[in-house]
Image (cartoon, rainbow, N blue to C red):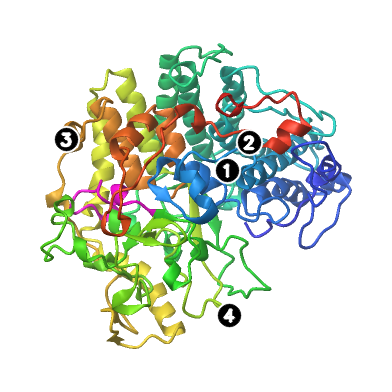
Amino acid sequence: MKTRYFILSAALCSVTGLGLTSCDNEKFLDVKAYDVVDPAASYESKENAKRALNGVYDMVFPNGSYDGDWGFKPNLFTGCHPTIDTQATGWDKNWNVQAWNANSDELLKGWKHVYAAICRANDFLDKLKDYPEDVIDVKMKKDLEGEGRALRGFFYHWLATTFGRVPMLATGENFLNTPMKAKAENYAVMWDFIIEDFKAAADLLDWKPFDNEYGRCTKGMALAFLGDAYMWKAYRLTEGANGIQGTGVAPTTANECYQLAAECFKKILDSNTYQLNPSFTTLWDPASAWGPEAIWVEQLDEGSNWGKWDNLTSNLMLKWYTACPENGGWGSLYLSWEWYSCYEKGDKRRQGSCYTGAVPQIDPNNPAYDPQYEGWYEPAIYGVNPYLQEVLGKGGSGTTTKQFHFNNGEWAPSIWSSKMWRTASADYKSWGDGHWSPTPIYWKRLPNVMLDYAECLFRLNGGDDATAWAQLDKLRERAFGKLEAGKEGDLTSKYLPYYNSYADWVGRVDGSDENGGVFHKTRTEYPLPFGSNDDLRKPAKEYYTAYAAQKGFSSPVWKVAVNTERRKEFNCEWCLRPDMQKSGFMADHVATNYPKRDVVDLKDVPWTNRDYDYNDLKMDMPIPMDEIMKNPLCEQNEAYRD
């Protein structure tokens, strides 16, 4: 949406920003072009009515007044790092070892950011009912209400999946007229509130976005989050209740919740509104913006503008957070070797998700090669970012990235995410006029729905459901390149041009360097060549039955299958920890995939040194201390009361 900075009816929340707690920032309405505007102006035209809602949409994006890193911090730290599949160094390392606490700055910033958004949504919805019919017709009013409720549900969903029970501000409430508020009475009451928002939004909205403006909430977005919310309520009624269940309103049993969730997901699948991208490896390319499987996406792309340090096109500078430090990165994101080793030979999702350092031990020709990786050597991502044609580690043969772990303040695995460090260098031409990183942050895409649907069916049918296994097989067909077969030419024509234009912009020439990187000014083949590896794929049920037994999981095979597919599909996508938590798989995942070890020399050993005891209660993050002090009715979560 091009009008993300035009905020109108949210003006009333400018006084809310002076309240006692979550909206306590007087810069609440600092926007690029406007100061506080009389809310009465909202009623003057259809355009103003639409723009009024933009004040809520604005909070989907990074916002310097609250949290300039929203979308990465706290989202990655709370949504991925606790799984240990993603890791960090420096002060960020606490997010890998359950050492976060109520004073963690990222939690407070996220809390403020989201409650600011909720206050805006509440104000918008409160005013919407008074809009004259001669200004906006019934259809438009339905669309605006649906979007407003979907957005409020989205922000509450993040709070509820991150902190557990939280205070629930309803339409018309803010922290000025309601300066103190207790948490929701119980989990069921809280999730019922969120369910009602998404249910209403799903009824009000269409499959296509209002005015064909991609970026707006749709029926598909509302249904995807509604099904997710039903699953969370089921989890809180059973294994995730933590002694505070409550019944709320119907549904009141876990089975009823899973049945309703399955119905939501089936509506999405039966609508044929969304399709899997033929290639997983292209999902984070500029040409994939709002592709066929995107259901709800935060698209960080300001057209084709290049920015400088004093003129950033996005507050969120993902390339520095996620790049290899020897190539200019800052060290907030690494991927574990345990995650790397969970893939099967031929699964293209690993190539489309990461790059590794040039570690000699993973070269199959090396006599010291670790048999855990036998046959999995992938030269395309071995020691190089193939998209940008940049060798990882500029230090030549002695670079520390040629080790399983290197020391960046603390030991970190030599693997970097290609989902966010792909289209913009953190090294070459980056420190002057190279600021452009067109990155999608996927909140919901079709595979989320497919795997959630499969989980619901497994639960409802005792773990043996052919339709559920078929969802996994469809996803795995794409993972092994089956959907690319016969489309290689079309895919190349669509996705290759950006990389050739990038090579031209940085002055790339044909040749190679001493580290083995091969560079091309103009390429004729996509960096990860298209084509099918489907002959290497086993049926999901067959493969995961053997895998679960070999690894020694305590969970049923279906749960291992669904959540291992989530690990392969959603690394660095914020939903990984919440999805595994609501599935009741986190404890088994940590115990089995990251057993406690006492590793002495990490540089020569791939495995993570987990030396802490996992506590499932800590998956509900602590309420920020700032909130506890200002709102004494909001009690601290159980695991953080000492």
Disc 3 versus disc 1: distance between alpha carbons? 43 Å
Secondary structure, mark 1, is: loop
Nearer the observer, disc 2 or disc 4? 4
Q: Quadrant of the N terminus?
A: bottom right
Left or right: where 595 falls relative to 17: left
Q: Which residue is mark 4?
A: 432
User: Do labels 2 and 4 touch, CB within 8 Å?
Assistant: no
Please report the residue visible at 15 percent of the width from the left and 34 percent of the height from the top: 546
Q: What amino acid is labelled 3 in the image?
A: Gln
Please report the residue visible at 21 percent of the width from the left and 66 percent of the height from the top: 360
Labels 2 and 3: the sequence-earlier one: 2
Q: What amino acid is labelled 2 in the image?
A: Gly
Q: Is residue 92 above or below residue 13?
A: below
Residue 292, magenta (yes or no): no
Q: Quadrant of the C terminus?
A: top right
Q: Residues within 10 Å of mark 4 (few under 14, many from 20)?
A: few
Q: In the rendering, at what x and y percent does residue 416 appear?
A: 38, 60
Q: Which residue is mark 2?
A: 146
Nearer the observer, disc 3 or disc 1? 3
User: Which label was assigned to residue 550?
Assistant: 3
Please report the residue visible at 60 percent of the width from the left and 55 percent of the height from the top: 69
Q: What amino acid is labelled 1 in the image?
A: Cys
Q: Which residue is mark 1?
A: 217
Q: Which residues are magenta?
A: 335-349
Q: Is residue 353 above or below residue 452?
A: below
Labels 2 and 4: the sequence-earlier one: 2
Residue 345, magenta (yes or no): yes
Disc 2 versus disc 4: distance between alpha carbons? 43 Å
Q: What amino acid is labelled 4 in the image?
A: Gly
